[in-house]
Image (cartoon, rainbow, N blue to C red):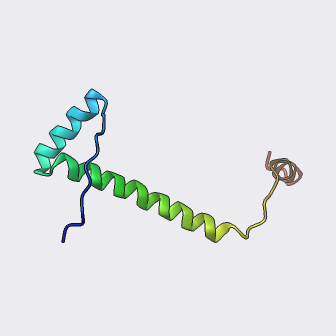
Amino acid sequence: MHTARKRATVYFDADLHRALRLKAAETETSLSDLVNEAVKLTLSEDAEDLMAWEERIAEPNLPFEAVVKDLRRRGRI
């Protein structure tokens, strides 16, 4: 099942475009499908980062200075 598609103009660096065209040919995949998959992967990673952020939101915020002082106090630095 294909979802609705929208057309967009995207400008690639010439070397990246060449690499994409070669990969598309080698994998018998369209350039559009390669770009869609790359974007999906990036958005999926962003979603994971946001979930991790939400899970850690209740953790205490430690000031950098306090962390450094604690490391020094414990002889770690």
Residue 7 drawn at (x, y percent): 25, 49
**Point 35% across, 52% down: residue:** 39
Residue 33 drawn at (x, y percent): 21, 53
Side of 48 relative to 10 (left or right): right
Q: Work out which residue is located at the far top of the displayed protein and give it.
A: 14
Residue 13 drawn at (x, y percent): 31, 29
- Quarter of the image with the N terminus is bottom left
Side of 26 relative to 72 (left or right): left
- Quarter of the image with the C terminus is top right
Near-viewer residue (64 or 22): 22
**Quarter of the image where one finds residue 16:** top left
Residue 57 drawn at (x, y percent): 69, 67
**Point 26% across, 27% down: residue:** 14
Side of 72 relative to 49 (left or right): right
Near-viewer residue (7 or 21): 7
Side of 13 relative to 73 (left or right): left
